[in-house]
Image (tube, helix red, strand yellow):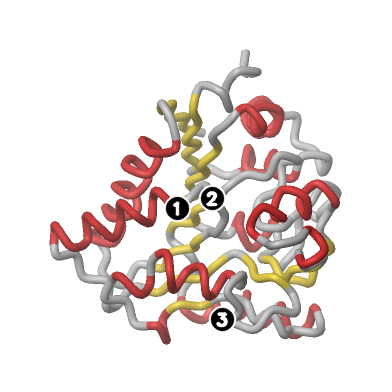
Amino acid sequence: MKIIKILDNNEAGKIVSDLILDEVKSNKNVILGLATGSSPITTYENIINKTKDQNIDWSNVITFNLDEYKGLESDHNQSYRYFMNNQLFNHINIKKENTFVPSGLIDSDNEAQKYDELIAQKGGIDLQLLGLGINGHVGFNEPGSDFEGLTSIVNLTKSTIEANSRFFENESDVPTQAISMGLKSIMNAKKIILIATGEAKAEAVKNLIEGPISKDWPCSILLNHNDVTVVIDEQAAKLLK
């Protein structure tokens, strides 16, 4: 596990955008796994600016997003499809038909697992971007999640619903379920980059980096992956030995 310490989320955006763009420049057919939430916003802003400045071609890139709220249509302004279009896809020359986000209208795990089949058909994810929940979730894989889990319908914990309520008018508007790539889906990626900033993430970062590997902290499964880069600020790193 490689650890990069940065000053703040703005610096994280500069560094992580370069890591992602290096993949795009070296492989025009690269398959990227992408994340939503507040952590990757500066990364996407930097990708947009550098893509324009360096004339980087995204026309053959394929992307798969980690998750989507269950029950939200893709054009809902809090859906992750809407977020990705707004924060990244509308501003680069990627083909929308090459960008995949789980459908919020999926009703069964059998239907959800077709997402993994599609990823495999396309060739597998070369680089997966992750954020980190305060309870150690990656994607929406909450504590107790099966390490062998594939894409499925998941129940969100109270702490996750509370954390995500800042994006909604009322906490009661936050969906209580999501469709999320499973931990095995994430571990299948060839490379992983995780961003965590802020003191609230410190306990999760400690368990991510120091272990032990435990379902109590789903992120700890990443200790079993052979190519993980963790980008953290001083506050998120404060509990590390």
Q: Residue at x 32, y 76 (%)?
A: 94
Instruction: Report whether 17 appears left or right of 84.
Output: left
Q: Position of residue 131 (x, y in %)?
A: 57, 48
Please determine whether, in this image, residue 205 is positioned above or below residue 42: above
Q: Position of residue 143 (x, y in %)?
A: 82, 47
Q: Does residue 189 appear to the left or right of 51 in the view shown?
A: right
Image quarter of residue 148: bottom right
Return the disc, 2 or 3, that comes first in the chain's sequence.
2
Which residue is more in the foreground, 196 or 112? 196
Front residue (pair 134, 223): 134
Per the image, the residue denoted by label 2 is 38
Residue on which disc 3 sits:
118
Q: In the rendered structure, which disc, 3 or 1, sits on the residue that comes first in sequence?
A: 1
Is disc 1 placed on a helix, strand or loop? helix
Residue located beneath label 1 in the image:
41
Could you say which quadrant of the image residue 47 lies in? Answer: bottom left
Please report contact status of discs 1 and 2: CB closer than 8 Å, yes or no.
yes
Q: Is residue 186 above or below residue 137?
A: below
In percent of width and height, residue 34 lies at: 49, 61
Report, in whole angstroms, how far the alpha carbon at label 2 lies from the one at label 3: 27 Å
Which amino acid type is marked by label 2? Answer: Ser
CB atoms at circles 2 and 3 under 8 Å apart?
no
Distance between mark 3 and mark 1 Cα atoms: 26 Å
Residue drawn at point x = 50 percent, y = 36 percent:
230
At 47% from the left and 35% from the top, the residue drawn is 231
